[in-house]
Image (cartoon, helix red, strand yellow):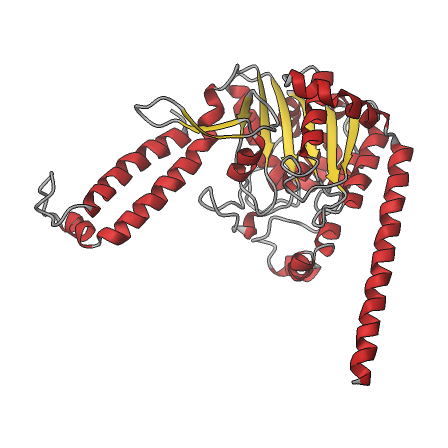
């Protein structure tokens, strides 16, 4: 029995007992007629215990989602999802999987959520990075490495679990930080791996490159949604995290909290891993997706990474640029249908499991993605940078006008 199902079963039993206690008038009026201090305490605080039991049941159900996909399809091929920063695996699969269900003990499997657009109709493996607390809250920032060694190690361990369970081919789907982690995992070569491995936290167990290479040899495709080229530049683009970015990316911060931080200013970045791409990585087919409306990981950050990957692996790197769509929700956005169709056309081209209807509709758009070369990407990048400069000038002009008006008053 998997960890998720064990947790869910214990949650059902605990919640049933707690909810039963909320309906009891006194300790002696229940079925068990127990007068122990613990049971008396439970009965005397029925409302609080009832609320806690419901929360515990929800937490148990959320953890059970991890193991839902164990029996969906054959074990030979599987898709592993890699969630973004300030996200969880549950949020990822709820918006990106075909059917989501919970296996309740003594009852048949019940599907409670269905999506018209999805990344795969086969087996899906999901996991949480170490910065997710209690499987639900992405608040353990001290464990965040933003796609660097610590995250790659976690990702490799989860892939290894799939391989041990009998999976032969792995397809990756990553969003934002998860896409950056997947990019580093797919591209990194031995020299960069060994060099950046030295920056890991003191006392942390390392991962040998030969083991890492064996795990990566099972990867066939990678869909990277809104990956960034460099974490520092991405932080600088967003007003809400500018203050946080100044702290986390400063050298002084790392000199003081070196023992506690996971992200390293000199650690691996996706653009660097793509620059030093391993020979074995060129066999993996990659689809890079971004949106021109994305304000967190701006399209220029993703396109710079795509240019470098296209330069090193032109045959197996494809780029899809959407006109509309918010960060982390491209599949359910205005251009989500195009994204879904192109993704399944890409899966068809790569020879992995796909939806035939989606693939047929997306065939034409995927051909355009295949035609988009390094030169075409550079032209798009120049246009984006021009728009950025123009927007900055307009912003400066407006602020100066406001200052002049205030001075007159």
Query: 292 or 271: which is nearer to us?
Result: 292
| Residue pictured at 31% horizontal, 48% vertical | 52
> Which residue reaches farthest bottom?
409
Q: Is residue 252 left or right of residue 396?
A: left
Q: Position of residue 266 (x, y in %)?
A: 72, 49
Q: Which quadrant of the figure has residue 405?
A: bottom right
Q: Quadrant of the N terminus?
A: top left
Q: Position of residue 114 (x, y in %)?
A: 51, 29
| Residue pictured at 56% horizontal, 52% vertical | 141
Would residue 292 be seen by someone viewing this image from the given angle?
yes
Q: Position of residue 225 (x, y in %)?
A: 69, 36
Q: Quadrant of the C terminus?
A: bottom right
Q: Is residue 277 left or right of residue 101?
A: right
Q: Which quadrant of the figure has residue 119?
A: top right
Vertical comparison of 66 with 329: above or below: above
Query: 75 or 103: which is nearer to us?
Result: 103
Would residue 189 be seen by someone viewing this image from the given angle?
no
Q: Which quadrant of the figure has residue 184?
A: top right
Q: Number of callouts in the render? A: 0
Q: Is residue 74 left or right of residue 212?
A: left
Q: Is residue 354 left or right of residue 133?
A: right
| Residue pictured at 58% horizontal, 32% vertical | 96
Vertical comparison of 383 with 186: above or below: below
Q: Position of residue 272 (x, y in %)?
A: 78, 40
Vertical comparison of 67 with 381: above or below: above
Query: 88 or 220: which is nearer to us?
Result: 88
């Amino acid at each position: 029995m998997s960890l998720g199902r064990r947790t869910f079963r214990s949650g059902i039993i605990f919640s049933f007992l707690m909810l039963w206690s909320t309906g009891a008038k006194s300790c002696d009026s229940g079925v068990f007629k127990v007068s122990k201090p613990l049971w008396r305490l439970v009965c005397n605080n029925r409302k609080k215990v009832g609320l806690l039991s419901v929360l515990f049941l929800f937490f148990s159900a959320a953890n059970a989602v991890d193991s839902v996909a164990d029996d969906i399809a054959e074990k030979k091929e599987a898709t592993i999802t890699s969630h973004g920063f300030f996200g969880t695996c549950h949020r990822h699969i709820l918006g990106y999987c075909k059917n989501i269900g919970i296996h309740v003990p003594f009852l048949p499997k019940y599907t409670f959520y269905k999506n018209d657009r999805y990344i795969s109709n086969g087996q899906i493996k999901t996991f949480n990075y170490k910065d997710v607390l209690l499987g639900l809250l992405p608040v353990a920032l001290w464990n965040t490495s933003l796609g660097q060694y610590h995250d790659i190690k976690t990702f490799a361990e989860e892939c290894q679990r799939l391989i041990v369970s009998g999976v032969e081919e792995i397809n990756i789907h990553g969003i934002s930080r998860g896409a950056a982690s997947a990019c580093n995992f797919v591209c990194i070569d031995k020299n960069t791996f060994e060099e950046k491995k030295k920056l890991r936290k003191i006392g942390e167990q390392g991962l040998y490159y030969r083991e890492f290479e064996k795990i990566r040899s099972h990867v066939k495709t990678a869909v990277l949604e809104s990956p960034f080229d460099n974490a520092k530049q991405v932080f600088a683009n967003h007003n809400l995290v500018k203050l946080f970015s100044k702290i986390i990316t400063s050298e002084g911060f790392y000199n003081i909290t070196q023992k506690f931080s996971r992200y390293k200013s000199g650690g691996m970045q996706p653009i660097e891993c793509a620059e030093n791409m391993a020979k074995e990585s060129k066999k993996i087919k990659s689809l890079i997706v971004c949106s021109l409306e994305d304000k967190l990981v701006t399209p220029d950050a993703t396109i710079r990474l795509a240019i470098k990957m296209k330069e090193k692996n032109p045959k197996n790197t494809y780029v899809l640029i959407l006109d509309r769509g918010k960060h982390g929700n491209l599949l359910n956005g205005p251009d989500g249908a195009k994204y879904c169709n192109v993704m399944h056309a890409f899966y068809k081209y790569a020879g992995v499991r796909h939806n035939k209807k989606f693939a047929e509709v997306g065939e034409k758009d995927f051909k355009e993605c295949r035609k988009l070369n390094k030169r075409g990407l550079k032209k798009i990048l120049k246009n984006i940078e021009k728009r950025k400069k123009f927007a900055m000038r307009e912003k400066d002009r407006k602020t100066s006008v406001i200052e002049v008006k205030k001075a007159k008053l």
